[in-house]
Image (cartoon, grey):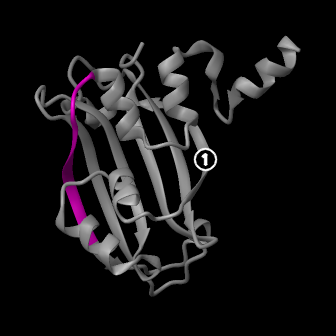
Amino acid sequence: MKNDLQKTLKHNHIDLSNLSYLQRIILITDGTLTDILEAYLLEHIEVLKVSEKVEVTTKEIPILELEAGSEIIDRRIFLQGKNSKKNYLYAESKIVLGRLDEDFKNGLLKSQTPIGHLWLKFRLETFKEIIDSGKEPVNELSAYFLDTEPKDQLLFRTYRVFSNRKPIMMITEKFPQSYFI
């Protein structure tokens, strides 16, 4: 039984048994990460948009079942503590505009509301499929995470979000391994 559990804990490129409970939860949950962070940190979490642009794809994106010439939002954000102003998580998203409800799309483009809170607000039914996880160096993101150096490690996960059985977004979330120990 224990050997079977160890095999289950190896999630793609990372051995989850070497991580803290919270790090494992963050990497494998399909719940709203913002709510998990707020409960753990006892601090309201806000979105700090680094960039967000609507663009037309020049090539197909198979993971989103998307042909070249489709409109997407390319979004990069930090989840940041409202009071502490500490960045806890960095995320990159590719979001298919043509598959979004108009109210959800406007909330995404015109507010600082986390995606998970928008899902709840607009009652968007979603399914998440984690497609990758692992570790990588913090590199240039060390300038945005307190107490990290470029050589330190980030934990990351990438997942697809489906609605109405179609992929509507691909999100990669990253946080320093030294966080949430």
Element assignment for label 1: strand
Q: Quadrant of the N terminus?
A: top right
Residue 157, x across and y down, in percent: 52, 41
Depicted 74 relative to depicted 23: above or below: below
Q: Which of 93 and 99 is in front in this view?
A: 99
In the rendered image, which residue does mark 1 sit on? 130
Q: Is residue 45 magenta?
A: yes
Q: Does the magenta stretch include residue 54?
A: no
Q: In which quarter of the image is residue 74?
A: bottom left
Left or right, 173 with reference to 118: right
Q: Residue at x 26, y 23 (%)?
A: 42
Q: Which residue lies furthest to the bottom in this view?
A: 69
Q: Quadrant of the C terminus?
A: top left
Give the magenta range. Answer: 42-53
Other-residue count near label 1 (Cα within 10 Å), few / some / many at <14 / 14–19 / ≥20: some
Q: Quadrant of residue 87?
A: top left
Left or right, 99 with reference to 76: right
Give the total of numbered labels.
Answer: 1
Q: Which residue is drawn at 57% across and 64% down?
A: 162
Residue 24, x across and y down, in percent: 55, 24
Magenta stretch, main secondary structure, is strand
Residue 167, x across and y down, in percent: 57, 68
Q: Amino acid type of disc 1?
A: Ile
Residue 151, x across and y down, in percent: 36, 22
Left or right, 44 with reference to 104: left
Left or right, 55 with reference to 86: right
Q: Which residue is drawn at 62% across and 22% down?
A: 16
